[in-house]
Image (tube, helix red, strand yellow):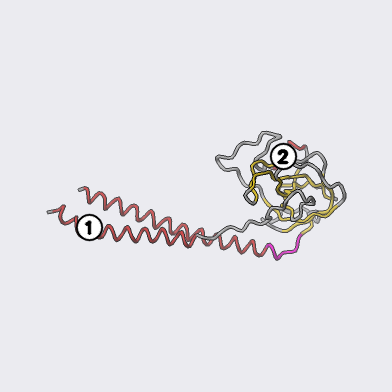
Amino acid sequence: MMVRSFFIFGLFLIVALLGLGTWQLHRKTEKEALLEALAQSQKTAARDIDKGSFTPSLFEPLYAEGHFVPGKTIFLQSKVHQGKSGVYILDVFQTQKGKFLLIQRGWSAREIADLPLEIMKIEGIARNPSRPHYFQPANKPPTYFWIDLKALSQDLDLPLLPYYLVAKDTSDPRIQPTPPIPIPRNNHLQYAITWYSLAFILLGMLLWVRKHYWKKENV
């Protein structure tokens, strides 16, 4: 009876391992599509934010002409860049047509609120804020850990656009640019092979158990 129960449990486990392997193959397809979209976005010419009303696609290159708004700097805390802990520096940029865009200027080991005051052109990649994970601290203004554009519009008293821009240039040598486009790893095929291999090994073990012990148990 004990061997039979182990055999049944093993079959359930094999099904679970096969399911994990199949899911990894599905994730591989999704990741390949994402990587292709990222590659295509880098070939696209930057679009002027002031040219009409539109919602940019994820990672679309954009640019705007205008100026930074003084007194609207925020810092995202606990950000690691090249192995060092610091902050992301974000400022509000007002375009020539009066749109307000949140700009992630880059990373710094300390909080820097100095702004270039001249009219300038700024280029970057459109990003949508990612949802905070379970263990991420809550934002308690003026301390921020993640981007919430609706809440920031209220905190800064400005109608921010529903996306933000990761700038290619920080306009400040003390601020290091952050990669505007993440390049995720696509290791899902290796993961799928691992899960399928475990399922195959377990199947071999169960067949061996069935051959050597099941008959003995039924004697």
Q: Identify which residue is drawn at 78% across, 40% down.
A: 72
Q: Residues within 10 Å of mark 1 (few under 14, many from 20)?
A: some
Q: In this picture, is 28 found above or below 71? A: below
Q: Position of residue 160 (x, y in %)?
A: 75, 44
Q: Residue 8 — which label? A: none
Task: Point out the image quarter for the C terminus.
Answer: bottom left
Specify the amino acid type for callout 1: Arg
Name the side, left or right, on which 111 lies relative to 84.
right
Is label 1 in a helix, a strand or a loop? helix
Q: Residue 152 — which label? A: 2
Magenta highlight on residue 206: no
Name the side, left or right, on which 33 lies relative to 202.
right
Q: How many marks do you count on the picture? A: 2
Is label 2 in a helix, a strand or a loop? helix
Residue placed farthest to the left in the image? 219
Q: Which residue is identified by label 1? A: 210
Q: Nearer the viewer, residue 198 or 48?
A: 198
Specify the amino acid type for callout 2: Leu
Q: Earlier in the sequence, mark 1 or mark 2?
A: 2
- Magenta span of residues: 41-46
Name the side, left or right, on which 25 lies relative to 122.
left
Quarter of the image for residue 211 reads bottom left
Name the side, left or right, on which 203 lies relative to 37.
left
Magenta highlight on residue 43: yes
Residue placed farthest to the right in the image? 118
Q: Nearer the viewer, residue 139 or 76?
A: 76
Q: Position of residue 58 (x, y in %)?
A: 66, 55
Q: Position of residue 187 (x, y in %)?
A: 51, 60
Q: CB of mark 1 within 8 Å of CB of mark 2?
A: no
Q: Identify which residue is drawn at 80% across, 56% down.
A: 51
Q: Residues within 10 Å of mark 2 (few under 14, many from 20)?
A: some
